[in-house]
């Protein structure tokens, strides 16, 4: 080949390689490069560790300081990681603010995470220091393992396991995760059939007035009846929230509850307000309210018969978008309850800003009544605030008479818990209402 052309093809090859494998921001390898390089290392007969690392709140950093600073931060983080690992180890930027690290040989997990945290927690860019937090997921690979994607998935799972945990910066994949993954896959494979076969059933848990002992409300709680075996929502709701199937399930439950309300209205002169759990994913659906109003009308149910429960985590402080949705919901006549109050990180301002009617005090507070005075003081403070804001209060998970007495004393409005009744299937719930007819 003519020398001139030979050079040209060399340059092009080099350029092409760069395009395909090098991340221009950090000059590290990209996702493709990571897969290739890890593959080469798999042949080595020694211990290997896969690490997924990302920067907490990187989006906010970009917003606050601009993309140029954001890119600079990625570059600096890449450099710091490179300094900390051996020449024979690998670091690549896999996507956005996600780095993949692959270590060959013995690794002291505590030591490496400590060093990563220490070196990356303060980064100097251009003119000043920035405080950064990172999250790390670790998977220690077995010697025979060859499936790189599954290794990455496991490190990501370990990473996700620390989400929302205060002051925990790394998670290590364990056998439990493996079992959880198998279970999740099993749940996912059964869910569509579950709806088609009407396997999801609704149980109702009464809410009793502290003043009059009347049944003033009930919460609809889903159960999955799989061939006679009951699967509790704690097992499948988190999976459905992840894969967004919850949107379908919430709507299905909502419709079933409306059917039950219609029936109860035909039997009883008055019925308790029914609370229905709605996930964030459902609320954020574009035509959420239209769809739900349509179902409500179909069964001659009034929004006023229903209270929608959303968890505290769904309402992030004064999130304008959320507030807009809730205002529309409220305008239609639905009640709005904040669920699990006290377990999230929302500020008290949220209570004033969001158009809510009811606050559900989480069981963790109730459990401490009579045990921890500080927590009891907290419930009293919550009560003062809710009275001032004219919110109704529901205590959740009340099991003991001592708790009931105390809640009566501090004027909590409603009590929900095993003390009065476990969640009941529809037939049992109707009987419960019949037996306590004078109490509605
Ligand atoms: P949650 O909304 O906080 O519901 C209260 C949970 O506490 C229910 O668990 C209820 O059975 C349980 N509970 C009530 N009283 C007591 C008590 O005295 N002691 C104890 N130990 N537990 C009590 P469940 O039914 O297992 O539901 C778990 C979670 O699953 C619910 O927590 C809710 O977040 C979610 N969930 C349930 N049904 C639905 C649904 O239809 N849609 C959605 N999106 N989520 C649901
Ligand atoms: Ca609830
Ligand atoms: Ca709750």
Image (cartoon, grey):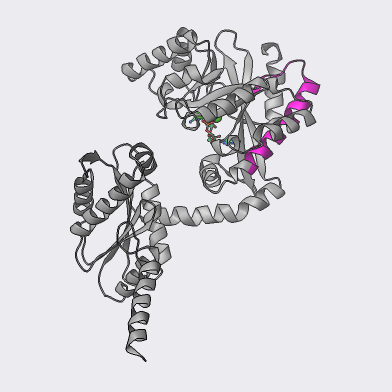
Q: Give the residue drawn at x 67%, y 38%.
A: 251
Furthest toward the right, the residue is 266
> Which portion, as a residue range, is magenta?
248-274
Depth check: give the residue in front, 62 or 244.
62
The N terminus, quarter of image: bottom left
The quadrant in which residue 422 appears is top right
x then y, percent, for residue 270: 73, 15
Q: Is residue 418 visible?
A: no
**Where 284 sits versus 264, above or below?**
below
User: Residue drawn 49% across and 11% down?
Assistant: 389
State which quarter of the image contains the C terminus: top right
Residue positioned 61% across, 54% down in the render: 190
Q: Position of residue 97 (x, y in %)?
A: 36, 51
Q: Is residue 101 magenta?
A: no
Residue 12: horizontal and vertical position, in percent? 37, 76
Q: Where residue 102 sits: x, y (%)?
A: 29, 63
Pick whichever, 201 or 122, lies toward us.
122
- Does the stretch in magenta take in 260? yes
**Label tally:** 0
Q: Is residue 251 above or below residue 315?
A: below
Image quadrant assignment for residue 17: bottom left
> Residue 105, can we see it?
yes
Residue at 22% x, 59% y is 82
Looking at this view, is 27 or 335 the one in front?
A: 27
């Amino acid at each position: 080949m003519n020398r001139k052309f030979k050079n040209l093809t060399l340059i092009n090859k080099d350029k092409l390689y760069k395009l395909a494998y090098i991340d221009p921001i950090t000059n590290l390898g990209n996702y493709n490069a990571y897969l290739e390089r890890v593959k080469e290392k798999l042949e080595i007969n020694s211990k290997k560790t896969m690490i997924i690392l990302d920067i907490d709140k990187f989006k906010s950093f970009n917003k606050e300081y601009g993309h140029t600073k954001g890119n600079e931060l990625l570059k600096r983080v890449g450099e710091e990681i490179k300094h900390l690992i051996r020449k024979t180890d690998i670091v690549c930027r896999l996507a956005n603010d996600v780095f993949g690290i692959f270590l060959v040989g013995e690794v002291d997990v505590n030591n490496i995470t400590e060093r990563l945290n220490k070196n990356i927690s303060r980064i100097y860019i251009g003119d000043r220091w920035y405080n950064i937090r990172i999250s790390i997921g670790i998977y220690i690979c077995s010697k025979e393992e060859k499936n790189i994607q599954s290794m990455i998935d496991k490190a990501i799972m370990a990473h996700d396991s620390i989400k929302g945990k205060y002051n925990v910066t790394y998670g290590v994949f364990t056998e439990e995760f493996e079992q959880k993954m198998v279970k999740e896959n099993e749940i996912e494979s059964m869910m569509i059939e579950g709806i088609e076969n009407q396997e999801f059933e609704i149980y109702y848990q009464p809410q009793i007035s502290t003043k009059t002992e009347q049944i003033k409300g009930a919460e609809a709680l889903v159960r999955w009846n799989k061939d006679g075996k009951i699967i509790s929502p704690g097992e499948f709701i988190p999976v459905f929230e992840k894969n967004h199937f919850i949107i379908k399930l919430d709507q299905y439950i909502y419709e079933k509850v409306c059917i039950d309300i219609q029936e109860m209205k035909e039997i009883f002169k008055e019925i308790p307000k029914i609370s229905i759990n709605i996930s964030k994913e459902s609320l954020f659906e574009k035509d959420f309210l239209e769809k739900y109003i349509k179902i409500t009308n179909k069964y001659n149910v009034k929004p006023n018969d229903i209270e929608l429960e959303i968890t505290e985590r769904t309402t992030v402080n004064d999130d304008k978008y959320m507030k807009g949705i809730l205002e529309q919901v409220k305008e239609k006549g639905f009640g709005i309850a904040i669920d699990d109050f006290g377990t999230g990180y929302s500020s008290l301002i949220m209570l004033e800003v969001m158009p809510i009617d009811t606050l559900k005090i989480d069981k963790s507070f109730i459990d401490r009544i009579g045990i921890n005075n500080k927590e009891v003081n907290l419930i009293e403070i919550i009560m003062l605030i809710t009275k001032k804001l004219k919110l109704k209060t529901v205590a959740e998970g009340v099991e003991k008479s001592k708790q009931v007495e105390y809640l009566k004393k501090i004027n909590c409005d409603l009590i929900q818990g095993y003390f009065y009744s476990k969640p009941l299937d529809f037939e049992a719930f109707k009987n419960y209402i019949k037996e306590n007819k004078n109490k509605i």
